[in-house]
Amino acid sequence: MSVTIEDISKKLKLSTSTVSKALNGYKDVSEKTRDLVMGTAKELGYHPSAAARNLRRQRTDKIGFVFNNSLMYISDYFAEVIVGATAAAETVGNNIVLYINEGDSPDSLIQLIRAREVDGFVFVWNHVPAHIVDMLLDENVPFVVLGRRVGHPQASWIAPDNYNGGLELMQHLINLGHTRIGFTTRPSMGRTNEDRFNAYKDGLIQAGISIDRDLIVETKLEPFSGYHAAKQLLDLNDPPTAIFAFHDYVAIDAHQAIVERGLKIPDDVALVGFDGLNVSAFTTPPITTVSQPLAEIGRESILTLLKRIANNDLPPIQKTLPVELKIRRSTQPEKSSNST
Amino acid sequence: MSVTIEDISKKLKLSTSTVSKALNGYKDVSEKTRDLVMGTAKELGYHPSAAARNLRRQRTDKIGFVFNNSLMYISDYFAEVIVGATAAAETVGNNIVLYINEGDSPDSLIQLIRAREVDGFVFVWNHVPAHIVDMLLDENVPFVVLGRRVGHPQASWIAPDNYNGGLELMQHLINLGHTRIGFTTRPSMGRTNEDRFNAYKDGLIQAGISIDRDLIVETKLEPFSGYHAAKQLLDLNDPPTAIFAFHDYVAIDAHQAIVERGLKIPDDVALVGFDGLNVSAFTTPPITTVSQPLAEIGRESILTLLKRIANNDLPPIQKTLPVELKIRRSTQPEKSSNST
DNA sequence: TCAATTTACGAAATCGATTTCGGGAGTGTA
DNA sequence: TACACTCCCGAAATCGATTTCGTAAATTGA
């Protein structure tokens, strides 16, 4: 079929061992032989078979990205993350394999792990339950959770600083004079939600503002679900003058709800989102948000995973990356800010 | 290390051949033995090694997606496509491997192909030059080009109907009474550009409107580059009353340029984009566009590729998929349409 | 000059599965 | 009884590389 190492060895009347060693930079090969091998390898168009290599080396130089989300709802997020991840991976010759909705049952996840198709896994999950972490540790497979903190102390993760980002948003709103600030929360109490919600509460507390339960409404997990949450807030007898949406897509929904009510952003209601996705910059007005260093998160996840692949006995690596407040016109009525 | 087929065979005092055959449904294994093998396989937590399988079967059950674009600029596009693709791939137990910016030089592409890490390739390239197609054919590797037509007669591709989509846009604008319609074109004359541009010209011709060269301006290849193109159009002595942007991101730029001039959309200038990306729905007003069946394109690409993997001597498969006009408020002044 | 190293290479094992081929045991038929 | 045929199973080759270990030849040192 294709050119194998044996074709080279036959042509040069050398053993396959010598050819392999010549190609892989071993020292016990003479200069002359090496040049000869390199030359005919190029001439014949030889490239090593990944399968044979993988089998022998017990390593694939591939990293699995496991999603249990539909990509549709995190396309911007995903795209930026993957850019950072692939850039980091390719510096060491690794490639990324996508597993979408494949780790949803523990069984299929175990199968995935034991097939050893990849050297390690990056989990892009909304929530990684403890029993999954236990299973991963039990299988002794290198892994890292991307984008969110994990409760389990033995799990490695790379996450944005949701708490401080949220706090900055709150301080921004409070500095603008807002005292009635609505918050849209999520049904499931993951770490991400917890951090942002705590930031909301602490932001109020630090400013000496009491917490009004009415201003906290729950959205569904689905994207584009912030519409009703925003309406619910606007329907209050004493409605908020600012809304802190859990993330940018929720903010976009809220934007629509606010506009439909005939209210002006930010004059009647200020609006902030979270995550810093592209879409939040395209609305009118663009929405103030906290941008995550997504490419950096992708990059760090890969670097962390590579460390664990090299030595999985390392203590867990857990990193919180700083986020950046992006002030846009949804909170600033006058002289538009210069941020994107 | 992990459980191998030999562990099972030793435990049951059977040969590895019998175990393998039992697991793979060969007929020359007795019912009793099969049950025994299946049972202990599950008990021991056996899963076949992908590398060993791949080597022996000369097949990986993996499909490579090769991008030479930065994903950043096509995140929405990519996400939808990949959803359709992974869904189609997983029905036959295939996974998708990402190769980003790896096929940019013919050398690295050849290396990729000869490593046989995947069974076939889906190319998501702006332009697939003839010499690359020749090389792919020469290597006899199954491949399909996603999202655009390819000039080479032997290439397989799945593409949206850019021409008819463009024609529908033009007819829509012309029905609204527009006679001066601007068009933003691209520097490189790929098929996609050609089709949309031809639709623009034919749309005018069919309506008996003569083509005004001033109304055709060129943008850079970079995204967010439609801003200057739009300004250039608006600066004309006899500016257009409608702008046909080459794709949605260009339209978003144009949107910004128009708003900055203090002009109203659609009253002063109507605006249409192309592709049907999410972002075009979030502007104010939302932008009329032609939506590509992205998930379907992803799905069809995989199905086509799988056919070619099964038999690469098949004649080339080339499919044009229908697109859908999405009328939004950027062209309809009154009573907002109900489409998303 | 002779022993001790170094240098350069090859034989063979190995990674973990799949698959071909051959044959013993059991059953059926003349 | 002899022969043909299934039914099951195992031995061994194979996929294509990597790597260990041994050794002949060349080089060095005393």
Image (tube, coloured by chain):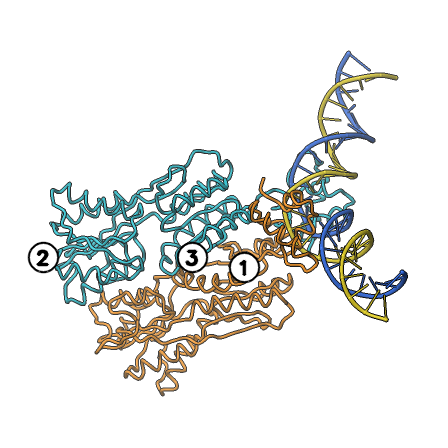
Chain colours: A orange, B cyan, C blue, D yellow
Q: Position of residue A38 (x, y in %)?
A: 60, 52
Q: Secondary structure at mark 2?
A: loop
Q: Residue at x 35, y 80 (%)?
A: A170
Q: Which residue is mark 1?
A: A93
**Is residue B263 left or right of B59 when viewed as pictured?**
left
**Is residue B74 left or right of B332 when viewed as pictured?**
right
Q: Position of residue A227 (x, y in %)?
A: 31, 64
Looking at the image, which is closer to me, A115 or A34?
Answer: A34
Q: Pointer 1 indicates a residue of which chain?
A: A
Residue projecting furthest to the left: B237
Q: Compared to B156, does A210 lie above or below?
A: below
Q: Pointer 2 indicates a residue of which chain?
A: B
**Is residue A277 left or right of B333 when viewed as pictured?**
right
Q: Secondary structure at mark 3?
A: helix
Q: Quadrant of residue B74?
A: bottom left
Q: Amino acid at mark 1?
A: Gly
Image mark count:
3
- Marks 3 and 1, how far apart in space? 25 Å
Looking at the image, which is closer to me, B293 or A206?
Answer: B293
Dividing the image into 4 quarters, which one contains the C terminus of chain A? bottom left
The answer to whether residue B43 is seen in the rendering is no
Q: Pointer 3 indicates a residue of which chain?
A: A
Q: Compared to B281, does B205 lie above or below?
A: above
The mark closer to the camera, 3 or 1, is 1
Q: Which residue is mark 2?
A: B238
Q: Amino acid at mark 3?
A: Leu
Q: Which label's residue is closer to the chain start, 3 or 1?
A: 3
Q: Which residue is mark 3?
A: A71
**Which mark is drawn over residue B209?**
none
Q: Position of residue A236 (x, y in %)?
A: 28, 73
Specify whether disc 2 shares its chain with disc 3.
Answer: no
